[in-house]
Each structure stands twice: as structure tokens, then as C-alpha cells.
Image (spheres, grey):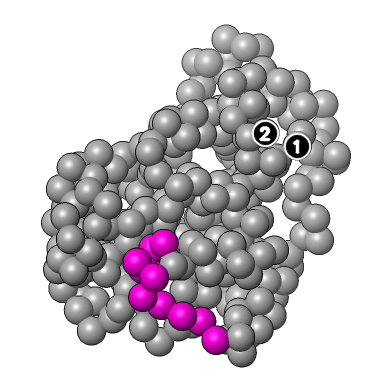
Amino acid sequence: MKNDSPESHVFYVTSRGYAADHWYAWFVKALNAHPELLAYLANEGSRPKYFTEKTRAERPDIVQYTRFMADVGMTYTGIGDCYSYRANKLDQLFREFGDTVRVVNLVRHPYAWLRFYVRWRMHNMRMSNGQGAPIEHEWRISNHELFKKLGLRDYTKSDIEIWATYQGMHHLNNILDDYSANIKHIPLEQLVKSRETFLEVVNYLTHRRITYSNNLLDTIYSWVWTPFRGEGRLAVNPDSEALDWPNWKIEAFELLHSEKARKCYEQFGYRY
């Protein structure tokens, strides 16, 4: 399929969830800082707040959604959706568009990812007071039977930190499904640290149609440690989070996070 097809300016950035992680938000802001790029941020979290035809577990048909974005972004050199879809759920996209619609999957250090995952749920996923459907959904899909079978610490529905921690640790094993997808996988930390890596990813997503000036890059990288509106104070070194874990978290991580998943993360340069 030719790169000048009507959908060739569309791209996707996948992940295992945004969860108000500043660096995930930073990448989208960095894309949108260029006047010829338009990127959506995690529509699967915002959409159910206002529209009842979809649940948190559902996504729009990706072929139709791609054509929708191609239409919306017709005056842009590139338009993309960030984090709404998972890397292992794109077979339909590839069958329809092949390499014309580019995809990159961003991974995160397991400890840092888990911290944001749990905090997002403890804060009711930024829902307004009285709206509890999203956290109800998270409780309903959590693998309570497995946690009980493993003899992990007891909890009630109100103990969000505990059961969300267990579910997040179990969820980290999905890296194996993502890694099996035949797409580019990039550690988010590499984008934050390396302008060269950032430009390589942008070049790939946009078929080398986009160029960032040094001045624009200076601006973008001045945001790396600056909280955006609605974000809390950033941890200096989120990857060291596990150093302060209580025993119940350490025990749970050993039982829930598989050895295969650990080795997969280590291939990205992460250390436990």
C-alpha cells in the first residue's frame, strides 16, 4: 500500500495505560507542539465520562476510527491517537492498512508504571464526585479469585490501594502479549532522555514528513520535569519506588509478576 494513501498521515501510539503519568502526557504534548501534528490523548478514559454508548472496556472499530481521524486531520501532516489502543489488539488495522498507518508501543519501567496505575484508581480516575462507574468496573474485572488463591493480604472493596496494586502487578504480565506484536517498542524513558530517539520515533510515525527545529526541541525538553495542569508533584526518581514497598507489596510482586515478564522488561534495559 502506498504511503500517499488517504490514511497515510494517521498513526497510533499504544501503551498499557496512561494513568496521568506525566511522561506519557509529555510525549503527546511534544507531538502537539508541532503545528503540523495533532494527537489525541487516551480517549478511552475520557469518552465514557460523557458518552453512554461505549464502556471503558470497548474501543471504536479501529478501521472506521482510522478513517475518521484521516478525515478530521486532513489539513495536518500527521494525526494520531495515543494510548487508547493496546499493541496486541491491532490485527484488523494491519490487515486493512499494512505499514501505511504507523504504530509505536511505549513501555515504562514496571515500578513507575505500577505507581501511576494505583494512584489513578485511588483518585477515582479523575471522575467527578458521585461518579463511580469506572472504579466499579476496575473492581469487577480484578482477579480476586487469583489473589485469594495465592494467599495475598485480605482486602475489602474500599481498600483500593491493595486490590489495585495486585491487579496492576498481574497486569504487568501483559507485556508478553504486547511484545509479540510486530511493531516498534520504545521505552518511554529513552524518549525523555534522548532527543535523537524522539526524532526517530516522530520520523517513523510520520513517514519522515515532519521536522522539529532546535528551538522547538529546547521548549519541549524544558517540560520533562514540569507538571502540567491537573498533575501533582513529580517524583525525582520514580523507578526507585520499590525501595519503600512494605512487605505485603514485595510478597505480592514476587507471586504475581511472572519470570517471563521480568525477562521481557529486562530486554528493554529495565532493572529490578
Residue drawn at (15%, 66%) of the image: 5
Q: Position of residue 162 (x, y in %)?
A: 65, 33
Number of other residues with Cα within 10 Å of mark 2, as a class: few under 14, some 14 to 19, many 20 or more: few
Quarter location, residue 51: bottom left
Q: 244 left or right of 136?
A: right
Number of other residues with Cα within 10 Å of mark 1, as a class: few under 14, some 14 to 19, many 20 or more: few
Question: What element does badge 2 sit on?
Answer: helix
Magenta part of the chain = 204-213
Residue drawn at (59%, 62%) of the image: 197
Q: Say if residue 23 shows up in the picture.
A: no
Looking at numbered disc 2 in the image, what kind of residue is underneath it? Glu
Q: Position of residue 8 (x, y in %)?
A: 23, 65
| 3D distance between C-alphas at marks 1 and 2 | 6 Å
Q: Which mark is residue 210?
A: none
Residue drawn at (60%, 55%) of the image: 188
Question: What element does badge 1 sit on?
Answer: loop
Closer to the chain start, of discs 1 and 2, is: 2
Q: Are marks 1 and 2 in contact (CB under 8 Å)?
A: yes
Say whether residue 224 is magenta. Answer: no
Disc 1 target residue: 271
268 lies above or below 51:
above
Q: Position of residue 163 (x, y in %)?
A: 59, 32
Task: Choose between 162 and 272: the one closer to the eye.
Answer: 272
Q: Which mark is residue 266?
A: 2
- Location of the N terminus (image quadrant): bottom left
Quarter location, residue 256: top right
Task: Choose between 70 and 120: the one closer to the eye.
Answer: 70
Residue drawn at (36%, 68%) of the image: 206
